Amino acid sequence: MGFVSKLVGAGLGFVLGGPVGAVIGFFIGSAFSGNQQEEYTSTNRRHATEGDFKVSLLVLIACVMKADGNVKRSELDVVKRFLLRNYTESDALEALQILKKLLEQPINETEVAMQIGQYMNYSIKLELVHLLLDIAYADGGFSSAEMAVINRIANIFRLSTADFDALCALYNKQQDADWMYKALQITPDVSDDEVKKAYRKMAMKYHPDKVAAAGEEAKQSATEKFRQINEAYEAIKKARGMK
């Protein structure tokens, strides 16, 4: 399998064990012989890798899609477009087939999120949640069930409320006149100097270099968040007449 082979080539660490390993065993197991898999798992499972990020994202996407108990064709189309933006066509289609198999399995979102949260650093966990929000919002809005699952995952990841709200603010530009302040985690009554300080802090937090080890999807997500932080800052500057 091309996509699975590339996952193995990118390295698989902690996802081969625990609840995530139980969920993905049906497609990862074919890439290893028994002894090889046991050796690989025992020696590498504690090192988060690019392959871990890809697998974790697929499992978490399945959790969100299963949230309301009814996986829609439109949701699969949204995920397919996402995969095509991040992978070659053949890899994207193979990843989609893996996702469909994941959707057929019972997944304990709490257990898999706890395992992922244990081994990923804070910046990478932020990008996982950012990508989940992107996918959930791709059809123009969030369902309450989807948001509940993403919120639970964010809590298990121990993301701060301020960071989660800042991510959500990016999707409320039409409904919330203060979205740009919330994206920078400040209020409209702060001084111009505080605006600048907040911008520098957020730009540093979402610099793509912080997630480089997680691979291209994470870097692209961080780059997009970095762009949106700049958009929020420019909107504040324009509203205030700042230089």
Image (cartoon, rainbow, N blue to C red):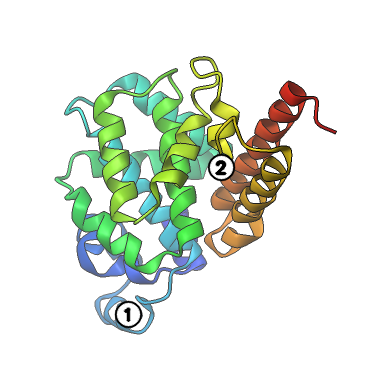
Q: Quadrant location of residue 142?
A: top left
Report whether residue 104 is seen.
Answer: yes
> Which one is earlier in the sequence, the residue at label 2 or at label 1?
1
Q: Quadrant of the C terminus?
A: top right
Residue type beneath disc 1 = Gln
Q: Residue at x 51, y 41 (%)?
A: 90
Q: Position of residue 121 (x, y in %)?
A: 45, 65
Q: Residue at x 59, y 54 (%)?
A: 205
Q: Secondary structure at mark 2?
A: helix
Q: Which residue is at the front of the view, 171 or 15?
A: 171
- In the image, residue 47 sits, relative to residue 29, either above or below, namely below
Residue 101 in view (yes/no):
no
Residues packed near mark 1 inside 10 Å, few (<14), some (14 to 19) or many (20 plus): few
Mark 2 or mark 1: which is in front?
Answer: 2
Q: Quadrant of residue 147?
A: top left
Residue, disc 1: 36
Relative to 27, say whether 85 is above or below. above
- Looking at the picture, how far across and down is residue 172, in whole percent? 49, 23
Along the line of sight, the residue nearer the viewer: 120 or 195? 195
Q: Position of residue 213 (x, y in %)?
A: 56, 65
Vertical side of 239 occupied by 156: above or below: below
Amino acid type, callout 2: Asn
- Residue at numbered disc 2: 86
Tell me where residue 131 appears, x and y as whole percent. Answer: 46, 41
The residue sitting at 47% across, 69% down in the picture is: 11
Quarter of the image that includes the N terminus: bottom left
User: For the residues marked 2 and 1, what is the alpha-carbon distance in whole angstroms?
Assistant: 29 Å
In terms of secondary structure, where does tag 1 sit?
helix
